[in-house]
Amino acid sequence: MDLGARLKGKHVLVTGASGGLGEHFARLSARCGATVTVAARRREKLEALVLDLRACGAAEAHAVELDVSDEASVEAAFAALKDGPPLDVVVNNAGIAGTGPSIDTQTAEFDRIIGTNLRGVWLMSVAAARQWRDAKHPGVILNIASIVGLRVIGGTAPYVVSKAGVVQMTEVLALEWARFGIRVNALAPGYIVTDINADFFATEPGLQMIRRIPMRRLGQPEDLDGPFLLLATDASAWMTGATIPVDGGHLVSAL
Protein backbone atom coordinates (compact mmCIF):
# COMPACT_ATOMS: atom_id res chain seq x y z
CA MET A 1 0.00 0.00 0.00
CA ASP A 2 1.45 3.37 -1.08
CA LEU A 3 0.25 5.66 1.68
CA GLY A 4 1.86 8.70 0.10
CA ALA A 5 -0.13 8.26 -3.11
CA ARG A 6 -3.33 8.50 -1.07
CA LEU A 7 -2.42 12.06 -0.08
CA LYS A 8 -1.89 13.22 -3.66
CA GLY A 9 -4.38 15.89 -4.67
CA LYS A 10 -5.52 16.54 -1.09
CA HIS A 11 -5.27 19.96 0.58
CA VAL A 12 -3.32 19.79 3.83
CA LEU A 13 -3.06 22.65 6.33
CA VAL A 14 -0.20 22.42 8.84
CA THR A 15 0.03 24.77 11.83
CA GLY A 16 3.30 25.60 13.52
CA ALA A 17 5.00 24.98 10.17
CA SER A 18 7.86 27.46 10.44
CA GLY A 19 10.17 24.75 11.82
CA GLY A 20 10.46 21.42 13.60
CA LEU A 21 7.84 18.74 13.06
CA GLY A 22 5.43 21.15 11.38
CA GLU A 23 7.93 21.89 8.63
CA HIS A 24 8.69 18.18 8.35
CA PHE A 25 5.01 17.27 7.91
CA ALA A 26 4.60 20.03 5.33
CA ARG A 27 7.55 18.75 3.30
CA LEU A 28 6.28 15.17 3.55
CA SER A 29 2.84 16.24 2.30
CA ALA A 30 4.42 18.17 -0.56
CA ARG A 31 6.50 15.18 -1.67
CA CYS A 32 3.26 13.19 -1.80
CA GLY A 33 1.78 15.68 -4.26
CA ALA A 34 -0.64 17.41 -1.91
CA THR A 35 -1.61 21.05 -1.95
CA VAL A 36 0.00 22.38 1.24
CA THR A 37 -0.89 25.46 3.26
CA VAL A 38 1.64 26.27 5.97
CA ALA A 39 0.64 28.46 8.90
CA ALA A 40 2.54 30.27 11.63
CA ARG A 41 2.45 33.57 13.47
CA ARG A 42 5.06 35.18 11.24
CA ARG A 43 4.24 34.68 7.59
CA GLU A 44 7.63 35.94 6.40
CA LYS A 45 9.31 32.91 7.96
CA LEU A 46 7.20 30.69 5.70
CA GLU A 47 7.93 32.27 2.33
CA ALA A 48 11.15 30.33 1.67
CA LEU A 49 9.44 27.12 2.79
CA VAL A 50 6.62 27.71 0.29
CA LEU A 51 9.15 27.91 -2.54
CA ASP A 52 10.78 24.68 -1.36
CA LEU A 53 7.42 22.91 -1.14
CA ARG A 54 6.60 23.84 -4.72
CA ALA A 55 10.02 22.62 -5.84
CA CYS A 56 9.73 19.25 -4.11
CA GLY A 57 6.39 18.24 -5.57
CA ALA A 58 3.50 20.09 -3.97
CA ALA A 59 0.53 20.57 -6.29
CA GLU A 60 0.28 24.05 -4.79
CA ALA A 61 1.84 25.67 -1.73
CA HIS A 62 0.64 28.70 0.22
CA ALA A 63 1.39 30.48 3.49
CA VAL A 64 -1.06 32.00 5.92
CA GLU A 65 -0.37 34.13 8.98
CA LEU A 66 -2.03 32.49 11.95
CA ASP A 67 -1.96 32.62 15.74
CA VAL A 68 -3.85 29.49 16.76
CA SER A 69 -4.55 30.86 20.24
CA ASP A 70 -6.38 33.91 18.85
CA GLU A 71 -9.96 33.30 17.71
CA ALA A 72 -10.03 36.29 15.34
CA SER A 73 -6.80 35.12 13.70
CA VAL A 74 -8.20 31.62 13.20
CA GLU A 75 -11.45 32.95 11.75
CA ALA A 76 -9.57 35.25 9.36
CA ALA A 77 -7.35 32.39 8.19
CA PHE A 78 -10.29 30.10 7.45
CA ALA A 79 -12.14 32.91 5.69
CA ALA A 80 -9.12 33.41 3.43
CA LEU A 81 -8.84 29.68 2.77
CA LYS A 82 -12.39 29.60 1.38
CA ASP A 83 -11.05 31.23 -1.78
CA GLY A 84 -8.76 28.27 -2.50
CA PRO A 85 -9.18 24.53 -2.96
CA PRO A 86 -11.27 22.86 -0.24
CA LEU A 87 -9.36 21.71 2.81
CA ASP A 88 -9.12 17.97 3.36
CA VAL A 89 -6.68 17.61 6.28
CA VAL A 90 -5.90 19.91 9.21
CA VAL A 91 -2.72 19.07 11.14
CA ASN A 92 -2.81 20.69 14.57
CA ASN A 93 0.92 20.80 15.21
CA ALA A 94 1.50 24.26 16.73
CA GLY A 95 2.74 23.91 20.27
CA ILE A 96 5.01 25.44 22.89
CA ALA A 97 6.74 23.99 25.92
CA GLY A 98 7.79 25.22 29.32
CA THR A 99 9.71 23.76 32.22
CA GLY A 100 9.90 24.37 35.93
CA PRO A 101 8.32 23.23 39.19
CA SER A 102 4.56 23.55 39.12
CA ILE A 103 4.55 25.26 42.52
CA ASP A 104 6.59 28.11 41.02
CA THR A 105 4.74 28.31 37.68
CA GLN A 106 3.00 31.63 37.18
CA THR A 107 -0.59 31.70 35.96
CA ALA A 108 0.44 33.69 32.90
CA GLU A 109 2.85 30.91 31.89
CA PHE A 110 0.16 28.27 32.39
CA ASP A 111 -2.26 30.30 30.27
CA ARG A 112 0.36 30.81 27.55
CA ILE A 113 0.98 27.08 27.12
CA ILE A 114 -2.66 26.04 27.41
CA GLY A 115 -3.62 28.83 25.00
CA THR A 116 -1.49 27.48 22.18
CA ASN A 117 -1.45 23.75 22.88
CA LEU A 118 -5.08 23.18 23.87
CA ARG A 119 -7.19 26.24 23.06
CA GLY A 120 -5.42 26.44 19.70
CA VAL A 121 -6.36 22.86 18.81
CA TRP A 122 -9.94 23.58 19.83
CA LEU A 123 -10.23 26.76 17.75
CA MET A 124 -8.67 25.19 14.67
CA SER A 125 -10.74 22.03 14.92
CA VAL A 126 -14.05 23.80 15.40
CA ALA A 127 -13.36 26.23 12.55
CA ALA A 128 -12.49 23.36 10.20
CA ALA A 129 -15.46 21.25 11.30
CA ARG A 130 -17.93 24.08 10.76
CA GLN A 131 -16.57 24.71 7.27
CA TRP A 132 -16.72 21.01 6.38
CA ARG A 133 -20.19 20.55 7.85
CA ASP A 134 -21.61 23.52 5.98
CA ALA A 135 -20.03 22.36 2.71
CA LYS A 136 -21.01 18.72 3.35
CA HIS A 137 -17.34 17.90 2.77
CA PRO A 138 -15.60 15.11 4.71
CA GLY A 139 -12.43 16.05 6.54
CA VAL A 140 -9.56 14.80 8.64
CA ILE A 141 -8.14 16.40 11.78
CA LEU A 142 -4.76 15.10 12.89
CA ASN A 143 -3.67 16.35 16.30
CA ILE A 144 -0.05 16.19 17.40
CA ALA A 145 -0.24 15.15 21.04
CA SER A 146 2.62 13.60 23.07
CA ILE A 147 3.37 10.59 25.19
CA VAL A 148 3.24 12.94 28.18
CA GLY A 149 -0.47 13.22 27.48
CA LEU A 150 -0.68 9.54 28.39
CA ARG A 151 1.95 9.35 31.16
CA VAL A 152 3.55 12.18 33.10
CA ILE A 153 6.97 13.57 33.84
CA GLY A 154 7.70 16.21 36.44
CA GLY A 155 8.70 19.77 35.77
CA THR A 156 6.42 20.36 32.78
CA ALA A 157 2.95 20.46 34.35
CA PRO A 158 1.22 22.93 31.98
CA TYR A 159 2.58 21.09 28.94
CA VAL A 160 1.50 17.69 30.33
CA VAL A 161 -1.98 19.03 31.10
CA SER A 162 -2.30 20.54 27.62
CA LYS A 163 -1.33 17.33 25.84
CA ALA A 164 -3.62 15.20 28.02
CA GLY A 165 -6.38 17.60 27.03
CA VAL A 166 -5.52 17.11 23.35
CA VAL A 167 -5.90 13.34 23.75
CA GLN A 168 -9.33 13.70 25.38
CA MET A 169 -10.39 16.36 22.87
CA THR A 170 -9.45 14.01 20.05
CA GLU A 171 -11.82 11.39 21.43
CA VAL A 172 -14.81 13.60 22.17
CA LEU A 173 -14.65 15.46 18.85
CA ALA A 174 -14.34 12.15 17.02
CA LEU A 175 -17.50 10.98 18.78
CA GLU A 176 -19.48 14.11 17.98
CA TRP A 177 -18.32 14.69 14.41
CA ALA A 178 -18.34 11.20 12.92
CA ARG A 179 -21.87 11.92 11.67
CA PHE A 180 -20.45 14.72 9.49
CA GLY A 181 -17.81 12.51 7.91
CA ILE A 182 -15.09 14.18 9.96
CA ARG A 183 -12.43 11.93 11.47
CA VAL A 184 -10.26 13.09 14.38
CA ASN A 185 -7.13 11.18 15.38
CA ALA A 186 -3.83 11.98 17.10
CA LEU A 187 -0.17 11.09 17.05
CA ALA A 188 1.65 10.94 20.38
CA PRO A 189 5.38 11.25 19.63
CA GLY A 190 8.01 10.28 22.14
CA TYR A 191 11.39 11.97 22.30
CA ILE A 192 12.22 13.16 18.78
CA VAL A 193 15.68 14.63 18.18
CA THR A 194 15.70 18.21 16.88
CA ASP A 195 18.20 21.03 16.59
CA ILE A 196 16.80 22.42 19.83
CA ASN A 197 17.33 19.33 22.03
CA ALA A 198 20.28 17.59 20.34
CA ASP A 199 22.86 19.15 22.68
CA PHE A 200 20.90 18.11 25.78
CA PHE A 201 20.62 14.49 24.66
CA ALA A 202 24.41 14.38 24.29
CA THR A 203 24.81 15.13 28.01
CA GLU A 204 24.77 12.47 30.73
CA PRO A 205 21.20 13.33 31.89
CA GLY A 206 20.09 13.16 28.26
CA LEU A 207 21.81 9.83 27.72
CA GLN A 208 20.12 8.49 30.85
CA MET A 209 16.76 9.42 29.38
CA ILE A 210 17.62 7.62 26.13
CA ARG A 211 18.57 4.49 28.08
CA ARG A 212 15.04 4.40 29.53
CA ILE A 213 13.60 4.03 26.02
CA PRO A 214 13.29 0.28 25.27
CA MET A 215 14.65 0.74 21.73
CA ARG A 216 17.61 2.70 23.21
CA ARG A 217 17.46 5.54 20.73
CA LEU A 218 15.74 8.82 20.07
CA GLY A 219 13.17 9.10 17.36
CA GLN A 220 13.85 10.86 14.09
CA PRO A 221 11.17 12.99 12.39
CA GLU A 222 11.03 10.34 9.65
CA ASP A 223 9.86 7.79 12.23
CA LEU A 224 6.54 9.63 12.26
CA ASP A 225 6.01 9.49 8.48
CA GLY A 226 4.18 6.15 8.29
CA PRO A 227 1.76 6.86 11.16
CA PHE A 228 1.21 10.40 9.86
CA LEU A 229 0.28 9.19 6.38
CA LEU A 230 -1.93 6.46 7.82
CA LEU A 231 -4.00 8.93 9.84
CA ALA A 232 -3.99 11.71 7.23
CA THR A 233 -5.35 9.53 4.43
CA ASP A 234 -8.24 7.16 3.77
CA ALA A 235 -5.94 4.27 4.66
CA SER A 236 -7.44 4.89 8.13
CA ALA A 237 -10.98 5.38 6.83
CA TRP A 238 -12.50 3.38 9.71
CA MET A 239 -10.36 4.98 12.42
CA THR A 240 -11.46 7.93 14.50
CA GLY A 241 -10.78 8.90 18.10
CA ALA A 242 -7.46 7.03 18.12
CA THR A 243 -4.17 8.21 19.58
CA ILE A 244 -1.13 6.38 18.25
CA PRO A 245 2.09 6.51 20.31
CA VAL A 246 5.31 6.60 18.27
CA ASP A 247 7.93 6.41 20.97
CA GLY A 248 10.32 3.46 20.66
CA GLY A 249 8.32 1.61 23.31
CA HIS A 250 8.76 4.34 25.92
CA LEU A 251 5.18 4.10 27.20
CA VAL A 252 5.53 0.38 27.87
CA SER A 253 8.85 0.72 29.72
CA ALA A 254 9.02 -0.68 33.23
CA LEU A 255 8.02 1.59 36.10
Image (cartoon, grey):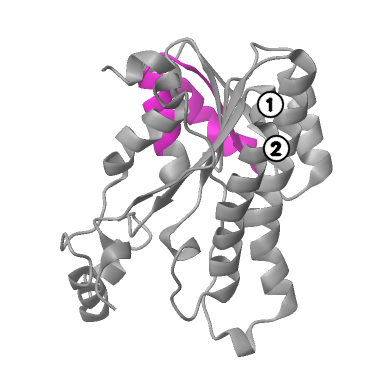
Left or right: 206 with respect to 71? left
- Residue 33 painted magenta: yes
The part of the image, by quadrant, that contains residue 96 is: bottom right
The part of the image, by quadrant, that contains residue 179 is: top right
Quadrant (top left/top right/bottom left/bottom right) for the N terminus: top left
Residue 145 in percent (x, y) is at: 50, 52
Circle 1 crowding by C-alpha within 10 Å: few under 14, some 14–19, many from 20:
few
Secondary structure under badge 1? helix
Question: Given contact means CB atoms under 8 Å apart, are the residues at marks 1 and 2 in contact?
Answer: yes
Outermost residue toward the right? 72
Q: Which of 82 and 139 is in front in this view?
A: 139
Outermost residue toward the bottom? 103
Mark linked to residue 179: 1
Secondary structure under badge 2? helix
Q: Give the range drawn in magenta.
A: 24-52
Identity, as a three-letter code, of the amino acid under mark 1: Arg
97, above or below 10, in the image: below
For image coordinates 35% across by 57% down, the residue present is: 190
Residue 101 in percent (x, y) is at: 54, 86
Residue 93 in percent (x, y) is at: 53, 44
- Residue 253 painted magenta: no
Identity, as a three-letter code, of the amino acid under mark 2: Glu
Quadrant (top left/top right/bottom left/bottom right) for the C terminus: bottom left
Q: Nearer the viewer, residue 13 or 38?
A: 13
